[in-house]
């Protein structure tokens, strides 16, 4: 299986190197970029499943605060199968809502732990593993955005609201994990039914070659028909 490709975009060399080393040790294929220009160049020439981008970086055009959003907007417009996580030194709920509305999968507030980083990647890969992953990720974002919007209107302090958001995210993940389990059951049933139809057809061919087109052959035809119908 090909290793998941991750791009880390940050102008802080220490953070880039530490994240890269950690993720490489976990078996991911990691590349890095120091600014928006180099990040966009790599995104145009390589396929990445996940991008972690700092929000504030030096840019040729615009303000530093827009740097990460330039990366996010490019991915959203041109690479719909790539998920972006925005990293920021401080995230208000307002900025988090902005990230999500543009298309970010999630955001991380610096300093964050390696455990938090790994959990975020695991969540992204879990959503990507669904049969209809683009729709699933879209549903997740819609729910996430709605919740962010509601939390934005509350009178709770920032720390409490972020903690509440993370708790709700866990509940959303639990819902989709349950849905994934149902999808797996459906796949197993579909494969089993396809196997039944195939074997019934094979047995019927053997009976036909033996000159037997009697009651058993009719039962096998009916089994194959019903199995095909339900696949």
Image (tube, rainbow, N blue to C red):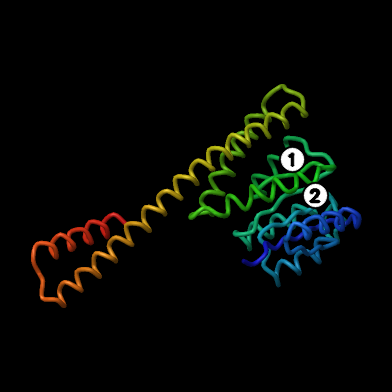
Q: CA distance from mark 1 to mark 2?
A: 10 Å
Q: Position of residue 134 (x, y in %)?
A: 54, 54
Q: Position of residue 208 (x, y in %)?
A: 15, 74
Screen quadrant of the C terminus: bottom left
Is disc 2 surrounded by few (<14), some (14 to 19) or many (20+) residues within 10 Å?
Answer: many
Secondary element at tag 2:
loop
Is disc 1 surrounded by few (<14), some (14 to 19) or many (20+) residues within 10 Å?
Answer: few
- Residue at x 53%, y 38% (from the top left corner): 175
Q: Position of residue 76 (x, y in %)?
A: 64, 56
- Residue at x 67%, y 27% (from the top left corner): 153
Q: Earlier in the sequence, mark 1 or mark 2?
A: 2
Q: Which residue matches tag 1? A: 95
Q: Are marks 1 and 2 in contact (CB under 8 Å)?
A: yes
Q: Which residue matches tag 2? A: 55
Q: Position of residue 15 (x, y in %)?
A: 87, 53
In the displayed structure image, the side of residue 12 where residue 138 appears, left or right: left
């Amino acid at each position: 299986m090909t290793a998941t490709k991750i791009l880390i975009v940050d102008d802080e060399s220490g953070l880039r190197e530490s994240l890269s080393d950690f993720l490489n040790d976990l078996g991911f294929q990691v590349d890095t970029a120091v600014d928006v220009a180099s990040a966009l160049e790599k995104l145009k020439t390589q396929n990445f499943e996940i991008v972690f981008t700092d929000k504030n970086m030096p840019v040729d055009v615009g303000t530093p605060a827009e740097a990460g959003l330039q990366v996010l907007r490019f991915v959203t417009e041109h690479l719909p199968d790539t998920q972006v996580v925005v990293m920021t030194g401080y995230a208000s709920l307002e900025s988090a809502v902005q990230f999500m509305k543009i298309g970010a999968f999630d955001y991380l507030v610096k300093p964050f732990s390696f455990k938090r980083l790994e959990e975020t990647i695991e969540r992204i890969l879990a959503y990507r593993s669904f049969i209809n992953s683009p729709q699933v990720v879209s549903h997740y974002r819609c729910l996430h955005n709605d919740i962010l919007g509601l939390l934005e209107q509350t009178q709770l302090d920032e720390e409490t609201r972020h903690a509440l958001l993370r708790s709700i995210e866990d509940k959303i993940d639990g819902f989709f994990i349950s849905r994934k389990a149902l999808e797996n059951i459906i796949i197993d049933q579909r494969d089993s039914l396809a196997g039944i139809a195939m074997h019934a057809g094979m047995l019927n061919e053997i009976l036909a070659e033996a000159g037997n087109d009697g009651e058993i052959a009719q039962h096998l035809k009916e089994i194959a028909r019903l199995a095909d119908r339900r696949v």
